[in-house]
Image (cartoon, grey):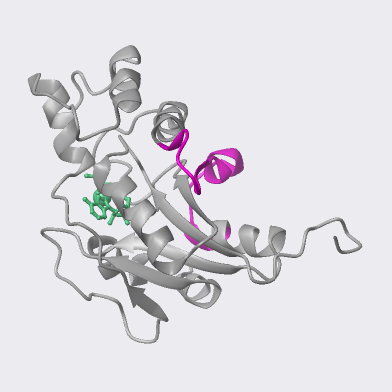
Amino acid sequence: MVPDGTVRNVGASIGVFGGTFDPPHVGHLVTAVNVRHALALDRVLLVVANQPWQKVGTRSISAAADRLAMVEAAVRGVDGLEASSAEIDRGGDSYTADTLADLARSHPGADLFLVLGADAAAGLTTWERSDEVRDLARLVVVDRPGAPAGGVPDGWRWDHVEVPRLEVSSTELRARVRDGRPLDYLLPRDVVACVRERRLYRDDP
Ligand code: ATP
Ligand code: MG
């Protein structure tokens, strides 16, 4: 402990994997587990966006509480994976720059790794205060079927991690619910139960 009560985390490594997670699926989970293993990270936080401002207005987004419940169900019992409500607790639009700054403050000395798929990496410069994101974390980029590989803008510190490529998206899973097609094995069983219990994705496109 240091005098102000914060815990020093020199040598600790934390993966930050943000998303809307509407719903979380095998593409997210296989990525999180394999990045953690490949880089020997202590923990990977699946940070549930409160308001994904780049998606608002383009489609209806499930309540943050529903999305958090699904991520909690997805990681329950999995070593090193944690659901984070940091952005929901903060409220308002969700900016990764704020999330990383808060983590850097609460975990002084820890190394932060921002995990993202190639589609998200290609859009990094459109993020709010992307220069702060660049300075606070090293990127970990995974390939994603359908997204061109290696779209990281110049000047960013980054690693590529090879993970099984799974052509799954939340968009396609929401369409599956609407059409009555099966979800099994594309989402953990407890997440499928959550979708059914909370009656998610039944009509809104
Ligand atoms: P949507 O279709 O609603 O955009 P999504 O499946 O893309 O959902 P997001 O919550 O938008 O999921 O993505 C969160 C993060 O997970 C992003 O960095 C994205 O690139 C990554 N990701 C999502 N699906 C995959 C996948 N199948 N393989 C690798 N990375 C993925
Ligand atoms: Mg997406």
Near-viewer residue (42 or 119): 42
Q: Residue furthest right?
A: 3
Return the residue found at the far bottom: 155
- At x 47%, y 65%, the residue is 40
Vertical arrangement, residue 138 with respect to residue 155, above or below: above
The reply, left or right, for residue 77 in relation to residue 54 is right
> Quick check: 182 above or below 72?
above
Q: In this picture, which residue range is highlighted in magenta?
A: 75-98
x then y, percent, for residue 9:
70, 65
Q: Was residue 8 drawn as part of the magenta stretch in this picture?
A: no
Quarter of the image for the N terminus: give it.
Answer: bottom right
* Residue 149 rendering spot, x and y as whole percentages: 18, 72
131 or 149: nearer the eye? 149
Measuring from the top left, give residue 29's x and y in whole percent: 33, 46
Q: Quadrant of residue 160?
A: bottom left
> Which of the image's four quarters has the C terminus?
top left
Nearer the observer, 135 or 91: 135
Q: Is residue 45 above or below residue 142?
A: above
Residue 75 is drawn in which quadrant?
top left
Residue drawn 45% across and 40% down? 78
Q: Which residue is pictured at 45% across the width and 28% down the height?
A: 69
**What x and y, as percent, mark residue 74?**
39, 34
Q: In screen coordinates, is 96 left or right of 122?
A: right
